[in-house]
Image: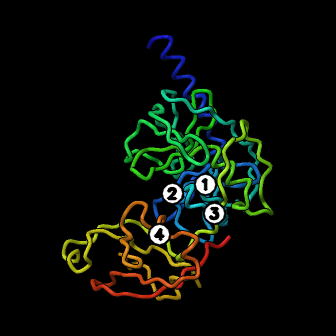
Amino acid sequence: MSEALAILSQSVSRVVADAAAWLCAIRTGPNRHVTGLVCEGNLIITCDQALPPLELYSIALPNGMLVGARAGGRDAGANLAVLALETAWAVPNPKIAETLVGGLAIVVGAAPDASPTVRLTVVHRLLRTADGPAAVLDLSSDRIDAGALVFDADGRLIGLASEGTNGEALAIPSAAIERMLTSGKADAAIRPAIAFTSPPAHRSVALGRRAWLGVALQPITVPDALAARAGQSSGRMVVSVTKGGPAETAGLRVGDVLLALNGTSASGPHALRAFLTPEKIGSTIEIKLLRDGNTLTAHLAVAGQPG
């Protein structure tokens, strides 16, 4: 190995080792988890689109300890969600990177026990957003670890990995993370004193609470024998129902397959996030389900996301 490659290898290893203090694994179901960024003030921030709405989450911290966290604010537009740890975890916020096209990008995710995983790539291009430029990464969409921390070669935070609206690997800008944490999206009683450097020049108007169904869902392929009856080949299976939530009130059960909301298919990667806008809160929608091999419709009163 040449000296230059040895130096690069050591630099990447150092960034990953430092990043471990900010990593956590958010348990979302059996053998499923999402990576999160632990911030000052005992807050966690992750991708909204990857996080099912639950009342309480089990979190694996960097030291392997399992603790609880309650739901905080969510911003579907920015694709960010905040959780509040029930156990203190002291950590300073990372420094912010100035994102450059062609710059090295080190994507650090969390394994189920919160130990780090890593992918090495570059910033392919920049995408304009309300919070400044977002880095589009030179990764295929099937290699995206939602919520993974994206750093530059100096260990400064570029953002959180997510899937963009066109299926590209995207880093949600650090500026959006800072805005989320310092706005009313985070519980005012637990909001941290942010120490991010390079405060963003761009601010966007805070959105209202996200609309909420009170279920956790996972993508599923509809069996061939039922696809014609369902009218589509995929949907979202209900894996948990929040007690007292809109879905339970409407009679949804674990094992139901959600097919459509007001005639809009629920099967696309961003369909639910696009549908559940703040304007839907308080409205009654028609949902189409597949249950025990039969299709049925029900009506559900949409509520606001708790927290």
Q: Residue 151's mark?
A: none
Residue 220 % position (x, y): 34, 67
User: What residue is disc 2 on?
Assistant: 33
Dot 4 amino acid type: Phe
Label 3 neighbourhood size at 10 Å, few (<14), some (14-19), many (20+)? some
Q: Are marks 4 and 2 in contact (CB under 8 Å)?
A: no
Along the viewing direction, whichever of 63 and 285 lies nearer the viewer? 285
- How far apart are the alpha carbons under marks 2 and 1? 10 Å
Please, what secondary structure does the residue beneath circle 4 have? helix
Q: Nearer the viewer, mark 4 or mark 2?
A: 4
Q: Are marks 2 and 1 in contact (CB under 8 Å)?
A: yes
Q: Are marks 4 and 3 in contact (CB under 8 Å)?
A: no
Mark found first going from the N terminus, 3 or 2:
2
Label 1 neighbourhood size at 10 Å, few (<14), some (14-19), many (20+)? many
Q: Residue 207's mark?
A: 3
Residue 18 % position (x, y): 64, 34
Q: Residue 60's mark?
A: 1
Residue 16, by quadrant, is top right
Colour scheme = rainbow
Dot 2 amino acid type: His
Mark found first going from the N terminus, 4 or 2:
2
